[in-house]
Amino acid sequence: MQTKFIAVVIAAAFAGTVGAQEIVKIGHVGPVSGAQAHLGKDNENGANMAVADLNAKGIKIGGKPVKFVLVLEDDGADPKQGTTVAQKLVDAKVHGVIGHLNSGTTVPASRIYYNAGIPQISPASTIPTYTKQKFNTAFRIVANDNKLGGTLGKYAVTKLGAKKIAVIDDRTAYGQGVASEFIKGAKAPGVQIVDKQFTNDKATDFNAILTSIKAKNPDLVFFGGMDAVGGPLLRQMKALGINAKFMGGDGVCTDALPRLAGTAAADGVVTCAEAGGVPPELQKNMDDFRARYKKQYNQEVQLYAPYVYDSVMTMAQAMQDAGSSDPKKYLPFLAKVKYQGVTGLITFDEFGDIRDGALTLFTYTGGKKTRMEVIK
């Protein structure tokens, strides 16, 4: 009888502990359907890893045990769908949002989060507009297009020796933004932008624009867009006999690009940049994360999973600093947070942009993405 009584007491105590555990809901949004699904799923995987790690640590906020749960939504890289799922997350009363991946979905969704007072950290969106709207809820942990596009433009001229440049963008907020900043960065004596063309983010046939570009005989083609378009574009460039170097931003800088471009992504043809990067002294942390990711998902990190992971961890750190998961209470702490993550030290400036954001330049060798250098 006594044994049974003790068992009941222990069970009751355990149930009380579970019942007292606060649920902290973190929304995550990315394109897990459509042509960019491999990137959206990569981001989602990073969020899952972070939440699992937080729960394994037994995090407490304000002295109370909490359980983090993800509320997952798919924006399909479509702005309209992005605002719809943003409102769903608001209605679900999430405590914070990690996302979106694309600039075109991040910016319209950010107003919805701002109006609801819900903090948002984008791990990937690079358009400057996002953090210039005076929304105190908007943060990002990667460098923006001003730095990304501008740095690539300078690199094309000073390091690759480009003199005649053609520029293509996919008409998305991201594609146009990074292409525009690239052109600004490429301005130098003797350098010509010989052609400017555009396509769309679902295009598969580039014959018309590439025929126009071929007639201008460029030595470098810059593409503002994502790998799902950039890969086939590069493939068709080769088929038409355009022997120019190919350059792009983070949207094309993925492990999937050689698969999408085929032999057109030959050694040294492509130069691209990720809007992030770690110096050599922090590389072990990134390597360890990538090894864990591969073990768990049986595939390589595609692009921004480490930045998603750090976004979740940064948000959780702000909650711990504030002693509350209430968005109104932890938001001021997020603005002044300091978190040493997989991708480096995360702190924000007065706009919500990452301080001292880095870029990493890559090329492709033997069909593999190969790091060239990290630029601060």
Image (spheres, grey):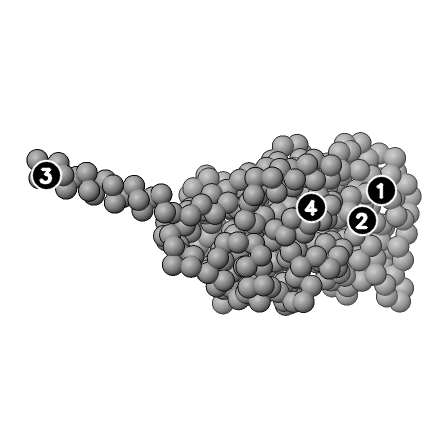
Q: Residue 200 falls in which quadrant of the image?
A: top right
**Where is residue 65 shown, x and y percent of the image?**
37, 52
Dot 3 or dot 2, earlier in sequence: 3
Q: Residue 256 falls in which quadrant of the image?
A: top right
Q: CA distance from mark 3 to mark 4?
A: 55 Å
Instruction: Please tell me whether mark 1 sits on a helix, a strand or a loop.
Output: strand
Q: Nearer the viewer, mark 2 or mark 4?
A: 4
Dot 2 or dot 4, earlier in sequence: 4
Q: Nearer the viewer, residue 345 or 29?
A: 29
Q: Nearer the viewer, mark 1 or mark 4?
A: 4
Q: CA distance from mark 1 to mark 2?
A: 9 Å
Q: Nearer the viewer, residue 116 or 198?
A: 116
Q: Amino acid at mark 2?
A: Gln
The disc placed on residue 214 is none
The disc placed on residue 176 is 2
The reply to whether dot 2 and dot 4 touch (C-beta < 8 Å) is no
User: Which residue bears the numbered disc 3?
Assistant: 3
User: Which residue bears the numbered disc 1?
Assistant: 198
Instruction: Please tell me whether mark 4 sits on a helix, a strand or a loop.
Output: helix
> Residue at position x 89%, y 58% from top?
192
User: Which residue bears the numbered disc 4?
Assistant: 112
Question: Where 136 sits versus 104, above or below?
Answer: below
> Residue at position x 63%, y 52% from top?
117
Q: Amino acid at mark 1?
A: Phe
Dot 1 or dot 2, earlier in sequence: 2
Dot 1 or dot 3, earlier in sequence: 3
Q: Nearer the viewer, residue 80 or 31?
A: 80
The reply to whether dot 1 and dot 2 touch (C-beta < 8 Å) is yes
